[in-house]
Image: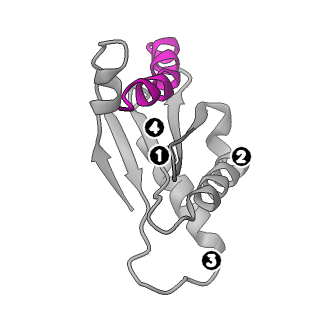
Amino acid sequence: MKFIEDETLFILTNNVEFEQVYQIVIDNTTDTKPPFDSRVFLTIEAIIIEFFKDTQKILVFVCDTMDGKQLARFKKFNRWHEKSKHNQSIKKLNDNYTDTDVELFYSIMIHKSNPKFKHLKSAFFSIKELLINDKP
């Protein structure tokens, strides 16, 4: 698991530069499917709670499409958020975009105390429009 600084999506939307935007990347480092481990959820939850101690931070999650399992990843991330302790203070917004052969699922997590919350929400939901209008 790692965080990658990612401001490009938001710079392109509404011409507003948001700071402290990170994409969360959760990778399986082996080619085999790992066995179910309930502690994975607890670990990710603890990391996200620590991440949002700074209420100005913004977290983006884009489901990998390389193996066609993006919907399963999206559902799992949603389940984790729904059962987590932080879901009252951290809002998770979801959207998806379908191109000719791939469906892309993505989410943003914003602390409800973030003073730019409404603007971030608006920027997030304009991403799909940007993707549609960018098609040749």
User: Which residue appears at 49% of the width and 87% of the height?
Assistant: 32
Picture coordinates of residue 56, whole percent (x, y)? 39, 26
* Distance between the alpha carbons at the discs numbered 3 and 4: 24 Å
Q: Is residue 79 magenta?
A: no
Among the 4 quarters of the image, the one containing residue 134: top left
Query: Around disc 3, counting alpha carbons within 10 Å, would you say few (fewer than 14), some (14 to 19), or many (20 or more)?
Result: few
Contact (Cβ within 8 Å) of mark 3 with mark 4: no
* Distance between the alpha carbons at the discs numbered 2 and 3: 18 Å
Disc 1 target residue: 61
Q: Secondary structure at mark 4?
A: loop
Please tell me how many numbered marks the rendered image carries.
Answer: 4
Foreground: disc 1 or disc 3: 1
Write down the region rendered in magenta. 114-136
Foreground: disc 4 or disc 2: 2
Disc with the residue nearer the chain's start (2 vs 3): 3
Residue type beneath disc 4: Phe
Residue type beneath disc 3: Asp
Disc with the residue nearer the chain's start (1 vs 3): 3
Contact (Cβ within 8 Å) of mark 1 with mark 3: no
Foreground: disc 4 or disc 1: 1
Foreground: disc 3 or disc 4: 3
Q: Secondary structure at mark 1?
A: strand
Picture coordinates of residue 15, whole percent (x, y)? 30, 13
Work out whether 45 lies above or below 34.
Answer: above
Disc 2 target residue: 82
Residue 37 disc label: 3
Extreme residue toward the front, this view: 136
Residue type beneath disc 2: Glu
Contact (Cβ within 8 Å) of mark 2 with mark 3: no
* Distance between the alpha carbons at the discs numbered 4 and 1: 15 Å
Residue type beneath disc 1: Phe
